[in-house]
């Protein structure tokens, strides 16, 4: 398939961009409200859970790759 064969619906693309921008603005509002309504300690504890789980996943992936 070549670029000239690709059909783009510009109205569909505009609608996608509009919805995407709307979702981003919603998320910003949501996050601001979240930060204002939760303590730093609560935030830190949640971040620790996230970071620890990511580190665990990386270690497990590295371990599996070494076994191959």
Image (cartoon, rainbow, N blue to C red):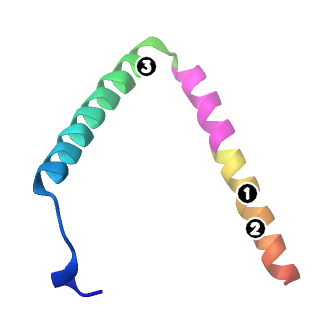
Residue depicted at 77% across the width and 63% down the height: 59
> Mark 2 sits on what residue?
61
Q: Residue 14 location in percent, x, y?
A: 13, 48
Q: Quadrant of the C terminus?
A: bottom right
Q: Which residues are magenta?
A: 40-50
Q: Residue 48 location in percent, x, y?
A: 65, 38
Q: Is residue 53 above or below residue 64?
A: above
Describe the element under mark 2 as helix, strand or loop: helix
Callout 1–callout 2 Cβ contact below 8 Å: yes
Q: Earlier in the sequence, mark 3 or mark 2?
A: 3
* Left or right, residue 44 beside residue 68: left
Main SS category, magenta section: helix
Marks 1/3: CA–CA distance: 27 Å
> Mark 1 sits on what residue?
57
**Circle count:** 3
Q: Is residue 45 above or below residue 10?
A: above
Q: Earlier in the sequence, mark 1 or mark 3?
A: 3
Q: Residue 65 location in percent, x, y?
A: 78, 78
Marks 3/2: CA–CA distance: 32 Å
- Which residue is at the front of the view, 7 or 41? 7
> Mark 3 sits on what residue?
34
């Amino acid at each position: 398939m070549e670029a000239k064969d690709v059909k783009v619906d510009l109205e569909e693309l505009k609608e996608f961009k509009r919805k995407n921008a709307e979702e981003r603005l919603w998320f910003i509002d949501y996050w601001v409200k979240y930060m204002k309504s939760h303590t730093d300690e609560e935030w830190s504890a949640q971040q620790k859970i996230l970071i620890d789980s990511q580190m665990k996943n990386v270690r497990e992936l590295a371990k599996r790759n070494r076994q191959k």
